[in-house]
Amino acid sequence: MSIKGVCFLFLFLLGASVGTVAQDSLRISKLLDSVRTLPNDTAKVSLLLKKGAANNRYFDSHKVENAFLQEALSLSQRLKYAKGMSSAYNEIGTAKRNKSLYIIAEDFHEKALKAAEEAKDTFLIVFSLNNAGVDCRRQDKLQKAFDYHVRALVLAEKINDIRNICVATNSIGNIQLSTEKYDDAITHFNHALELEEKSHNELGIAINLGNLGFAYQGLNKVDLAIQYHKRSLAINLKMDRPIGMAICYNALGAAYKEKKDYPAAMEYLEKALEVNDKVDDKVHVAESYLSIGKLLGAQGKHDEARKYMQQSVDISTFWGFKSMLMEAYKALAADYKESGEFEKSLAAADKSLLYKDSILDEKSAMALTQMQTIYEVDRKDNQIRTLEHDKVVGELRTKRNVVITFFLAAFLLMAIVGGFFYIRHRNLKANKQTLQLELRSLRSQMNPHFIFNSLSSIHRYIWSNNQEEASDYLTKFSRLMRLILDNTQHTFVTLNKELESLRLYLDLESLRCNGIFEYHFNIDPEINDEEVLIPPMILQPYVENAIWHGLVHKLPEEKGLLDIDIVLKKRSLVCTITDNGIGRKRAMEIKDRKGRMHTSVGMKVTEGRIDLIRKINNKEAKVTVTDLEDEAGHGIGTKVTIVLPAEFIF
């Protein structure tokens, strides 16, 4: 299809759709109003979910949130209906995934999983696990995706949920296919195929046959791969499924090209091009033109090959397919190089790299935007919960004042005595609340401080490493940020959650410092890290200080060591951070030599937090810094001891 043909098709479809937009909007508005008149109960939640799923395409086309699903979620939260919350989170998360917002989708599906576990609904747990696994797979977080799908598979087999067994098994196979574990992938695809055949699910059968074809192609068993692709094609033809036919035709074209059977390869690729006209996503048309161009180039027909490659470029430019433009210009560069036209090859290669850089920039910006969106959503949820809590507290305070007034009228003497003690108690309580507010304020300062330092680290890392590694670093950073945002919502978190975020932070710092140091956690065996509580982000500033003022200044041949010991002594939690760095004295000399006057915000804020913890609890809470020296008095490291009151969940 020429670029003019694509334009004409687009204008025709646009004109045909304009007449129905107003009608669709009116229909959705009336339907939503009719549902809102129903009583606020679980039946209304179910109806909202049903209508939301049925009208997803309308909201996606208008690029607005699905009003039915948003109301279903809000109503479920008011009713404390965990099953409804899980279903709504799952639907919203899937809608986000369909828009390639994978980080936000994963966050919604993790919330769906938490609500499903609260509802103790095994089916919803399995469904949420599979959804979260798909989100992770789309982000190339393959190990996490694998863990989600394995958990889903185990639970689905317990309740004999065939549909989710097939989804989990197929997804595990796809993960193994991505990691080139072809034999394991074939085992899972065959198992999924067997289940789909028993369920008479033709779409599932076609998908697994195609996957088997790709797996055998990976093992260089091209003839066997062709057999499976043809079986998948036959089912897609029977179902009249254009996207499935296009995938099969392209796969067969690639297989026959590998066999150097160019006429057969061309036949299938031309069929893929023809059937792609029936597929809404025009990226497949551009892909077919590019595949034909590569095939002609492999036969030495360079002029003809470039015409097809240029058509791929024209369509991709019109629709804004940057990934396809990157591949098309890369193919043109290779073709020009093969025919000795090096200047044109270099120009095409530059354009390919330009689009690659643009794609990487967009991915980084999208990841940060999605993290900000998640933060804003969580912040609004917390504000709503705070307002509800304040409302309850206000009602209780009103009732208390009524009771006090009644007793004042009846028993004047008792009221005077009681009033005295009440005023004294209120003053003590107000003083404690003031201290707690100061503590909360200091704790909230840790977020921007830590985010600023981490983003500065990412900025330096991007400029000192290639973009692929920077992308991996940014993904790990987003996971750490999610933990930090979760943990710092609370005054105390369990020790295992705090250690999890600290380990992830140390992994990132070790990666950025090229592994110049090792770290070890030594936890007292008598401590149950799921029951012991600790203030969030209380250790991180001291760990950061040990790395950047002690360990990074060691000689390259000296391995840095960082030990974090946590023990329980009577009613105190003693945390010791020991490093074998250059010591505070030499660190200050380096700092003075460089003329730095910056004072560590993290250390200052944390010292203030520990001082407030001591005042609020009237218990021992302190920080002691000890300089470690050898026999000659030279600094060989620093030991920081943090003593906190021991807090427990129970």
Image (tube, rainbow, N blue to C red):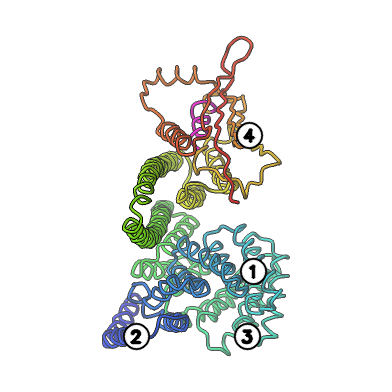
User: Label 1 crowding class (10 Å Cα cut-off): few <14, some 14-19, many 20+?
Assistant: many
* Secondary element at tag 3: loop
Q: Secondary structure at mark 4?
A: strand
Q: Is residue 546 magenta?
A: yes
Residue 152 numbered tag: 1
Mark sitting earlier along the chain (2/4): 2
93 versus 209 height, above or below: above
Badge 2: residue crowd in 10 Å (few <14, some 14–19, many ≥20): few
- The residue identified by callout 4 is 565
- At a point 34% along the width and 85% down the height, the residue shown is 37
Mark 3 or mark 2, which is nearer to you?
A: 2
**Magenta region, residue range:** 540-551
Q: Amino acid at mark 1?
A: Ala
Question: Given contact means CB atoms under 8 Å apart, are the residues at marks 3 and 2 in contact?
Answer: no
Element under disc 2? loop
Q: Nearer the viewer, mark 4 or mark 3?
A: 4
The number of discs equals 4
Q: Is residue 129 magenta?
A: no
Disc 2 residue type (three-letter):
Thr
In which quadrant will I find the N terminus?
Answer: bottom left
Q: Residues within 10 Å of mark 3 (few under 14, many from 20)?
A: few
| Disc 1 secondary structure class | helix
Query: Outermost residue toward the bottom?
Result: 238
Q: Earlier in the sequence, mark 1 or mark 3?
A: 1
| Alpha carbon separation for disc pair 2 and 1 | 38 Å
Q: Which residue is mark 2?
A: 37
Task: Give the amino acid type for the residue marked by disc 3 in the picture.
Answer: Asn
Q: Which residue is mark 3?
A: 201
Toward the viewer: 96 or 538? 538
